[in-house]
Image (cartoon, grey):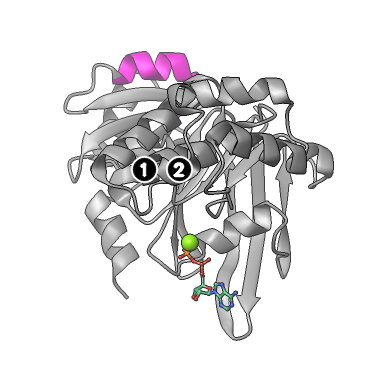
């Protein structure tokens, strides 16, 4: 399946500050994709480039397999900074203004997006009477106008209390169930772990790793194995002792072991004795602690 977004070698400097250094990764359709990194790692810069707010110094990116165009931009809803809503107007009136200025969606969408973010009952309240969490949900409602396929959120829970954070998380999960692809930047490992299916980790503008959350963050060794016949290989490896899970991934089979317990020679011998010759056998990953040690230390 073609990725929703493909990023190839993006670099960006502000004067002598290198904010992004040759970053590449793909965002699969239907994923909740977290861009995780401490403050200053380049997350907002990356999202701004992807939304044509900033221009990269080098590298390319493609949405839906195509270079950016007004047409592709219509399929992307975004929330980078809190929008300038009018404090003395209601949610509904604010969205009418947003809709008219952006040209996204129609008046008829407004009630629908307010339903999705659970503000329908408070839609006639003034913006100034909203809690921070409600304001953030209204901003997400604005991003939903025009029913975009992809949503881009920068630190969507920043500044919210625990209840507000939980509500935004729940909303992101619901949007994913509705089939949206969601790309969100966050500096919180916990948040990314809870809502994202995929992530990319940035540190000082460099991509450390990208992939499925359960693989990147799992405290497990992943042994990647391949032979001519993946179905047969998987059925044989089902008998191998000591693994925690096993899955087929394209032509390869991935066997997960508690960290430090994968024994390649034993897997090789086991398969050979069952009449299978492997053409690939390698350990793919490191533990969560190792990843985060790299992330937070120099
Ligand atoms: P993040 O969103 O991960 O916190 P940013 O993309 O905002 O990171 O920033 C990445 C780096 O670029 C930081 O060192 C930041 O200070 C710098 N930076 C961001 N915007 C500007 C700017 N407009 N001018 C100069 N430096 C900037
Ligand atoms: Mg930022």
Measuring 32% from the left and 24% from the top, which residue is drawn there?
246
Q: Nearer the viewer, residue 98 or 174?
A: 98
Rendered image: mark on residue 131: 1
Helix, strand or loop at label 1? It is loop
Which SS class for mark 2? helix
Against 111, residue 264 (above or below) is below
User: Residue at position x 20%, y 43% from top?
Assistant: 259
Most distant residue in the front direction: 88
CA distance for labels 2 and 1: 6 Å
Residue 135 numbered mark, or none: 2
Q: Sort mark 2 into few (<14), some (14-19) or many (20+) by Cα contacts within 10 Å.
A: some
Q: Decide if residue 114 is on the left or right side of residue 194.
A: right
Identify the main secondary structure in magenta: helix
Residue, x 54% and y 46% (percent of image)? 88
Considering depth in this image, is 69 or 206 the residue closer to the camera? Answer: 69
The image shows residue 215 at horizontal and vertical percentages of 36, 39
The x, y position of residue 16, in whole percent, is: 59, 86
Q: Which residues are magenta?
A: 226-237
Q: Is residue 262 magenta?
A: no
Compared across the picture, whether 121 is left or right of 53 comes to: left
Q: Which mark is residue 164?
A: none
**Dividing the image into 4 quarters, which one contains the C terminus?**
bottom left
- Does 229 lie within the magenta span? yes
**Do the residues under discs 2 and 1 have CB atoms within 8 angstroms?**
yes
Q: Position of residue 192 (x, y in %)?
A: 36, 44
In the image, what residue occupies the spot 67% across and 58% down?
Answer: 49
* Residue 11 visible in the shown view: yes
Residue 1, percent across and down? 64, 27
Looking at the picture, does residue 49 appear above or below residue 129?
below
């Amino acid at each position: 399946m073609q990725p929703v977004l493909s990023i190839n070698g993006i670099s960006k400097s502000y004067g002598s500050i290198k904010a992004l250094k040759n970053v590449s990764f793909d965002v699969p359709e239907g994923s909740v994709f977290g861009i995780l990194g401490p403050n200053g790692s380049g997350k907002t810069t990356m999202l701004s480039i992807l939304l044509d707010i900033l221009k990269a110094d080098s590298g390319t990116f493609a949405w839906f397999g195509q270079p950016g165009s007004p047409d592709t931009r219509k399929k992307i809803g975004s929330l980078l900074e809190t929008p300038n809503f009018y404090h003395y107007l209601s949610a509904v009136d604010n969205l009418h203004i947003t809709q008219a200025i952006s040209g996204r969606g129609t008046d008829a969408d407004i009630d629908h997006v307010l339903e999705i973010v659970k503000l329908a009952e408070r839609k006639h309240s003034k913006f100034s009477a909203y809690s921070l969490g409600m304001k953030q949900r209204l901003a997400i409602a604005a991003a939903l106008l025009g029913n975009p396929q992809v949503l881009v959120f920068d630190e969507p829970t920043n500044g919210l209390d625990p209840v507000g954070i939980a509500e935004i998380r729940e909303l992101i999960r619901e949007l994913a169930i509705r089939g949206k692809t969601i790309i969100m930047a966050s500096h919180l490992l916990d948040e990314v772990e809870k809502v994202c299916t995929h992530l990319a980790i940035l540190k000082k503008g460099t991509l450390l790793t990208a992939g499925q959350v359960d693989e990147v963050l799992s405290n497990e060794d992943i042994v990647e194995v391949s032979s001519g016949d993946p179905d047969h290989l998987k059925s044989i490896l089902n008998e191998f002792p000591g693994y925690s899970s096993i899955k087929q991934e394209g032509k390869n089979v991935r066997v997960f072991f508690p960290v430090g317990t994968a024994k390649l020679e034993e897997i090789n011998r086991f398969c050979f004795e069952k009449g299978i010759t492997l053409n690939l056998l390698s350990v793919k990953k490191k533990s969560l602690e190792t990843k985060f040690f790299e992330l937070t230390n120099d």
